[in-house]
Image: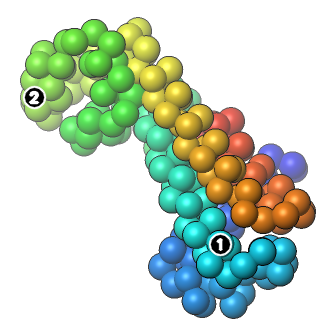
Amino acid sequence: SAKKTIVSLLVVGLAAWGAFAASPEFTYRRAGSLATHATDAKGFAEAAKAYARNLGIAFQIKDDILDYTGGAGLGKPVGIDIREQKITLPLLGAIKNTGNGAEIRKMISEIHGKPEYSEEIRRFVLKNGGVEYAGKWLEKYIGEAIEALGAFPDCEEKEALAEIARFNALRTR
């Protein structure tokens, strides 16, 4: 299906650009068609790094959002970040929106002994705009990833990478 193809592209794109960040010279030689469209090697390298960095941050923010909003198809239980005592962007946003940080942080620190706090914290985040707060940051990083592609002239590869970035906001797993 088209959805499966897009998910596959996302995985391939993340792997390719992650490899670039780890080994720019190796990936540059194998970057294929997109590299042939670059106006200069340095500009290509900087654009690819910026794209990868911003896409990676956006991907993590979306993962954090899904920890509060995800369903059965997520692949991991909802609320696992809370149970692991991770204070992620949606939680920080809800705390910022309410100024209720001390009580929530105390609940997180006690979560192993009181697992019922997990659902209470999840509801707190959903009720107090934590997901929307994180969503604004998600859009910012997606926009910056797409903007980084401006170093390349229009081509199919550039549009595919932009679609990967845009898909991140829509993904449900």
How far across and how far down the image is residue 55, in percent? 57, 53
Query: Would you name the residue on which mark 2 appears?
Result: 110
| Residues at marks 2 and 1 touching, judged by CB atoms closer than 8 Å | no
In whole angstroms, how far apart are the C-alphas of marks 2 and 1?
A: 49 Å
Quadrant for residue 92, please give it: top left
Going by the numbered disc 1, the residue's amino acid type is Gly
Query: SS at mark 2?
Result: loop
Which of 115 and 9 lies nearest the eye of the viewer?
9
The quadrant in which the C terminus is found is: top right
Residue 43: which disc?
A: 1
Which of 61 and 119 lies nearest the eye of the viewer?
61
How far across and how far down the image is residue 68, in percent? 44, 27
Packing grade of label 1 (10 A; few <14, some 14-19, many >=20) is some
Q: Earlier in the sequence, mark 2 or mark 1?
A: 1
Q: Is residue 5 above or below residue 23?
A: above
Left or right of 163? Residue 101 is left
Q: Is residue 89 above or below residue 95?
A: below
Q: What count of labels does the image hold?
A: 2
Q: Is residue 26 above or below residue 52?
A: below
Left or right of 153? Residue 14 is left
Quadrant for residue 96, please give it: top left
Left or right of 171? Residue 156 is right
Q: Is residue 88 visible?
A: yes
